[in-house]
Amino acid sequence: MALSAQTSTFSRIFWPLLAWGIALIFFFPIFWMVFTSFKTDADAVKPEHLFAFKPTLENYLNMTENYDYWRFAANSVITSVFATVFALIVGVPAAYAMAFNPSRHTKDILVWMLSTKMLPAAAVLYPMTFLTKNFLGIFDTHFLVIFVLCLINLPIVIWMLFTYFKEIPKEIIEAGKMDGVSTWGEIKAILIPLAWGGVASTALLTFIFCLNEAYWTVRLTTTEAATLSKLIEGNRAPEGLFFGRLSAVSTAAVGPIIVLGWFCQKQLVQGLTFGAVK
């Protein structure tokens, strides 16, 4: 009995401390980036000003006045929103067909779609750049970025929606067909209301993936459709995140993402999950 009590006390203390320690380790780079962003470039590289320094907003003012931050931020939001919407427009009917009208090739198609995520992006970068710049004339456009972001996230969207849709009893869909509901009516009036928590979670995750995408948004844009990833890449410094200006740029770029993710997790995902369970 005493041994059991000691084990229980140890578990209550050790596992929370371990979880907090791991969380702090992962959070520390973000903290240091934000912390350094309030230093001048001179203070950021001096060891004596590692913790003792005079905070300043000079880097943020410089970024908003000289680096056109809001245009990059708007491009990030526009491309991420439209890429997410288009991925859902394609993904919902595709997952519906695979979940409720499967064929003997459905599993093979799902595996094939997932295997496309294993393709190295660098393998298709040159031909895509060559075609879009010299033949199609859509290089550095919102359309190209949206199209690419939609394609690279579509396999994940279909897989997630397929998993959620499979949890819905097929008899409900068949009952709708017996009542004369069309396929679009089944998706709109039956499927989405029953799986709206899963659809919202998929949309949120896709939006975050699109907003965080750096490889394609950096290499397929120059100025017109450049996103926040391009802004960060264009302000690289040998000093890395210890450089005050780059820390400010990075903080301003990832700050909205962090706030959005926290807000959606608290207000959207948990609320939808609670509503689905209830």
Image (cartoon, rainbow, N blue to C red):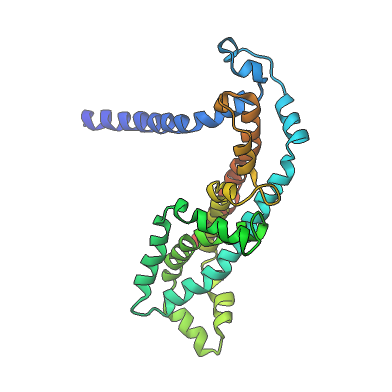
- x%, y% of residue 163? 42, 65
Q: Is residue 16 visible?
A: yes
Identify the residue shown where x is 54% and y is 58%: 128
147 up-or-down from 169: above or below: above
89 up-or-down from 241: above or below: below
Which quadrant of the rendered structure holds the N terminus? top left
- x%, y% of residue 170? 42, 78
- x%, y% of residue 136? 63, 64
Q: Residue furthest right?
A: 65
The quarter of the picture where residue 255 lies is top right
Q: Is residue 29 left or right of residue 5?
A: right
Identify the residue shown where x is 55% and y is 49%: 213
Circle count: 0
Q: Is residue 32 visible?
A: no
181 up-or-down from 258: above or below: below
Q: Is residue 199 left or right of residue 55?
A: left
- x%, y% of residue 197? 53, 61
Q: Nearer the viewer, residue 163 or 167?
A: 163
Q: Nearer the viewer, residue 242 or 100?
A: 242
184 up-or-down from 92: above or below: below
Q: Residue furthest top?
A: 48
Q: Is residue 11 left or right of residue 203?
A: left
Identify the residue shown where x is 55% and y is 65%: 196
